[in-house]
Amino acid sequence: MCPDLNLRRALILLWTGAVVVIALLGGVTSSRAAGPPVASATATLNIIAGDVKVISPEGGPARAAKDGMNLAVGAHVVTGQKSTALVTFLDGSTLTVQPDSDATVKQADLGKNQSTVRIKVNLGTVWARVARLVDSGSSFSLESNSATATVHDGLIGARQEADGTFTCWTRAGTLFLVDPSGRIISELKPGQMDAVKTGRPSNPHPFFSNDSALRVTTSPDVLPLILMADKARLAGFVSPRFEVNQVFGAFTGLTEQGGRVIEVPAGVAAPFTLVLEGQTSGPFEVTIAGLFKGAPVFLQRLSGTIKIVERVVSTIMPQLDDATAGNPKTAKVVGLTATPFQPMDGPLPGVLLLSPWE
């Protein structure tokens, strides 16, 4: 056979193979579930619920916030009785401003490896998910006139009351509470809280946002994400490297086996939405537990199969003790129903911004 003919056939086969590979790769890319947008500003303000207002660094009257607006250092975020705001920083850290609250971004020096963020809690309650960065000098602080609560990374919150009491807590990460002179008032471990008030000694003690909670534990094969019963706030995972935690008192973390855990406050008889995204193709397992004051009161196990990047969804309905159901903070969860997982189309629910560095 002619050597030139052999060469031409080899080139044709090589070109055909390349086209097939490109087509296959293109198919994988196009079938991947749509991901959240990426943050581009130092701080971005999103409206989770209700009417949110902003006071500019220069002062003046509070003006209606625009969803997705850039937030300048020095600006106040003010929420009303049924309003919640989310501030996403460029490093991936987030600040949830709870209803009836006022918080100021005092500092936001952000880098890919090191960041310093300072939030002044003027009144009300805030909740922060602090991204883990390489440099040990990175810090995120929640401040009042009487004390400052600082972590390197983790899940922390603070409440400033009108009488001057400043209460802090941590679900993940060691939190240092210091007075204005720099003296350490207390060192809080995950699951602890403390309050600062003139004349009151330090008293670290267990933290529960609500007496009841839902805990979802998954095998490593899937990324779980919970949409709360308010259909607005999220807690969970949207990529192997990115977790979201917008829910006051919630926990998001990993198991020793590489699975994922989400624990969110319960106490309302309303549906929670659980979304799973496949990381590999094959079987998965999910355990849903109801907790009361930290102790499990029931377990339900679900399983199924999933394809890589496929999303499936289930609705979880907590069942509450009738005698305590009137108050979400003290209501006791006694059971649940979970619908079978169904395929999910479209984007993820809620408000999500990814850091370009995560």
Image (spheres, grey):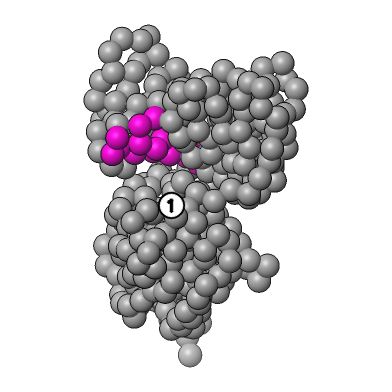
- 217 in relation to 340, above or below: above
> Is residue 149 at all visible to an observer of this figure?
yes
Res. 238 image quadrant: bottom left
Q: Is residue 354 above or below residue 214?
A: above
320 left or right of 177 in image: left
Disc 1: CA contacts within 10 A as few (<14), some (14-19) or many (>=20) = some
Residue type beneath disc 1? Lys
Q: Nearer the viewer, residue 96 or 280?
A: 96
x, y (%) of residue 303?
46, 83
The residue positioned 35% from the left and 10% from the top of the image is 59
Q: Farthest residue to the front: give it.
A: 323
Residue 148 visible from this viewpoint: no
For mark 1, give the secondary structure.
loop
Q: Which residues are magenta?
A: 81-101
Residue at the far right: name it. 183
For this orientation, the residue located farthest to the bottom is 1
Picture coordinates of residue 348, whole percent (x, y)? 33, 58
Quarter-of-image position of residue 202: top right
Mark 1, residue position: 329
337 versus 63 height, above or below: below
Identity of the residue drawn at 42% across and 77% down: 307
Q: Which residue shows up at 47% across the image and 79% down it? A: 300
Residue 63 included in the magenta stretch of the image: no
Q: How many marks?
A: 1
- Say whether residue 69 is left or right of residue 202: left
Q: Is residue 304 left or right of residue 346?
A: right
Tell me the quarter of the picture where residue 229 sits: bottom left
Residue drawn 40% across the image and 44% down it: 353
